[in-house]
Amino acid sequence: MATGETQIDNGIFRVTKWTIESGDAIPMHVHDVEYVVVPLVNDIMHVTNSDGSELVAEIRIGQSYTRPAGAEHTVANRGSGTIEFVEIEKLL
Amino acid sequence: MATGETQIDNGIFRVTKWTIESGDAIPMHVHDVEYVVVPLVNDIMHVTNSDGSELVAEIRIGQSYTRPAGAEHTVANRGSGTIEFVEIEKLL
């Protein structure tokens, strides 16, 4: 299962720790705001965008990346390990 | 030594990965903006505020916390391990 734990939601930042077990995925969703991802594991994520395009994203512990508002995708874990990352959204 | 690697600086977020070796510290500094910290290790940080007060902060992998603009402090690693965390500052 993919689960999100809200760690901070203070009107400035919303921070969610995501866990995606092997074989599971975060369903299609739209990012309303700019965000940063901080991976907690070294792994591969399979991202499918709403237009059907796919990309394979290699993530590395502590190597952050940012994406603009408007991103719409699923994020799947097709590997054997558990994927964990922290997502920081800018609310203001 | 304490070193900061700028990973993102796009006018919206500034993201810095900090590494504090055993016995070292990040010198006194002021946070101009709100920020989130995502620890990459389980460890203890010794924080000394500009008013002389001290606190011992236990950090855990992936357990984020946020602090307001205006914080002014040193952050020391008095343990034997290397402390690593990612700091996300909100620039806009």
Image (spheres, coloured by chain):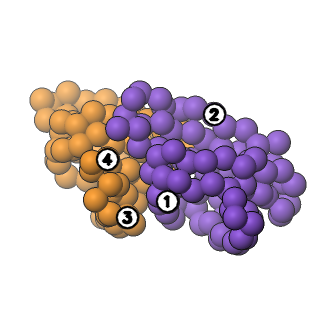
Chain colours: A orange, B purple
Q: Is residue B50 above or below residue A61?
A: below
Q: Is residue B60 above or below residue B17?
A: below
Mark number displayed over residue B67: 1
Q: Residue flagged by tag 1: what amino acid is it?
A: Arg
Q: How far, Cα to Cα, is label 2 from label 1?
A: 20 Å
- Pick the front one: B39 or A41: B39
> Quick check: do tags 2 and 1 share a chain?
yes
Where, quadrant-wise, is the N terminus of chain A in this rendering?
bottom left
> Quick check: do tags 4 and 2 share a chain?
no
Q: Residue flagged by tag 3: what amino acid is it?
A: Ile
- Helix, strand or loop at label 4? It is strand
Mark 4 touches mark 2? (CB < 8 Å):
no
Residue that carries the numbered disc 2 in the rendered image: B5
Residue that carries the numbered disc 3 in the rendered image: A8
Single out the residue that lies furthest toward the front: B51
> Quick check: do tags 2 and 3 share a chain?
no
Residue found 18% across the figure and 44% down from its top? A32
Task: Indicate left or right for A51 with B74 as reference.
Answer: left
Q: How far, Cα to Cα, is label 4 from label 2?
A: 21 Å
Q: Earlier in the sequence, mark 3 or mark 4?
A: 3
- Helix, strand or loop at label 2? It is strand
Q: Percent position (x, y) of residue B44? A: 72, 67
Q: Residue flagged by tag 4: what amino acid is it?
A: Lys
Comparing labels 2 and 1, the label whose residue is closer to the camera: 1
The answer to whether residue A83 is seen in the rendering is: no
Q: Percent position (x, y) of residue B84? A: 67, 50
Residue that carries the numbered disc 4 in the rendered image: A90
Q: How far, Cα to Cα, is label 1 from label 4?
A: 14 Å
Q: Earlier in the sequence, mark 2 or mark 1?
A: 2
